[in-house]
Image (spheres, rainbow, N blue to C red):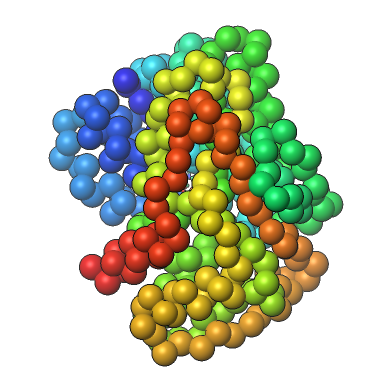
Amino acid sequence: MKALVTGGAGFIGSHLCDYLTSQGHQVTVLDDLSTGSKENLAQLAAAPNFEFVEGSILDTALVDKLVGSCDTVFHLAAAVGVHTIVDKPLESLRVNLHGTENVVEAAARHGARIMVASTSEVYGKNDADGLTEDADRILGSPLKSRWSYAAAKGLDELVAYVYGKETGIPTVIVRFFNIVGPRQTGRYGMVVPRFVSQALANEPITVYGDGTQRRCFGSVFDVVPAVVKLMDTPAAYNQAVNLGGMEEISIRGLAERVIELTGSSSTIEYIPYEKAYGEGYEDMRRRMPDTSLAKKLIGYEPTRRLDDIINSIIEAKQA
Ligand SMILES: NC(=O)c1ccc[n+]([C@@H]2O[C@H](COP(=O)([O-])OP(=O)(O)OC[C@H]3O[C@@H](n4cnc5c(N)ncnc54)[C@H](O)[C@@H]3O)[C@@H](O)[C@H]2O)c1
């Protein structure tokens, strides 16, 4: 495979690059280093089958050139994290809308296979017991910047889907549900690395809201091979596929697990959403994936438990 990984200097993207290069594939990364970093790829710097290009997915000519020299595109570049989206709504929207359109258009022009990274955020406030891929989307007003990420990712899916249908390029949409692991940064609002850093520093763990909201966390080491398998599975083309873990926990419960596993003396501090994210912020009470489609397509079965995931982050932060 000659793969282009957009957003390859980021958290999931860098693990995907490790995996692809270890399998002998040729990998090129396009990343503007806005939330990613070169350190995430330092281990690959000398690899003969790896190349890093610093640039933006908004640069149409560059995207066209790089996509044209690959046969498979893993499109992960995006403005991510609640803080990024709320603090820079216009820039985030441009990257998440126009950037994706650029990448998908180039894939269609060059006949490359493409995987587009989407998110459980597209389900919005739907708190069903196991969200299947055809579940309804329940979103707040598009004028609340909190929902702009979900709105843009929903359109990204549509762009990928329609291009796939009309041009015949193999297209897979992957909806990630709270993926966690080493290299994820807490700086842009990601909860597990933020809690682990606070616990290791014995600082109060700041839980936004009352902590009763429930989530499932998936390991990056489970989802990366799954993404590559889906790209090689024609039955997955032109489908959206959920990927994540099924073990559900409240955010307060997560804070308690992190305190226990780090042996920290941290206390838990509850911060109102308005104080954390500004006026009018809405959260969803629960988000739980149904991953039976991934199981049917590729035999996907998450193997890492939440404690394993938290421990892997603790170890990485202590290294
Ligand atoms: N981590 C999760 O739990 C999760 C959940 C749902 C969806 N996703 C999706 O998975 C993908 C990867 O997310 P991540 O968690 O690794 O985040 P990340 O921030 O670590 O990775 C995103 C990468 O995209 C790069 N980028 C941003 N704008 C760019 C631009 N204009 N041009 C080129 N590169 C640009 C960033 O520098 C970064 O390296 C994203 O599309 C995200 O929406 C992630």
Q: How many marks?
A: 0
Between 257 and 2, the one nearer to me in the picture = 257
Which residue is painted at 51% across and 88% down in the image?
267
Between 193 and 212, the one nearer to me in the picture = 212
Between 94 and 8, the one nearer to me in the picture = 8
Q: Position of residue 110 (x, y in %)?
A: 47, 12
The picture quadrant where one finds residue 229 is: top left
Q: Position of residue 100 (x, y in %)?
A: 58, 32
Q: Position of residue 153 (x, y in %)?
A: 65, 40
Is 269 above or below relative to 184?
below
Which residue is painted at 46% across and 28% down in the image?
298
Q: Is residue 145 left or right of residue 49?
A: right
Is 98 above or below relative to 179?
above
Is 217 above or below relative to 62?
below
Which residue is painted at 33% across and 61% down in the image?
312
The picture quadrant where one finds residue 250 is: bottom right
Residue 60 visible to the viewer: no
Quarter of the figure with the C terminus:
bottom left
Q: Is residue 290 left or right of residue 127?
A: left
The picture quadrant where one finds residue 236 is: top right
Which residue is painted at 61% across and 42% down in the image?
290
Quarter of the figure with the N terminus:
top left
Q: Is residue 286 left or right of residue 144?
A: left
Between 244 and 281, the one nearer to me in the picture = 244
Residue 27 visible to the viewer: yes
Q: Position of residue 255 (x, y in %)?
A: 52, 75
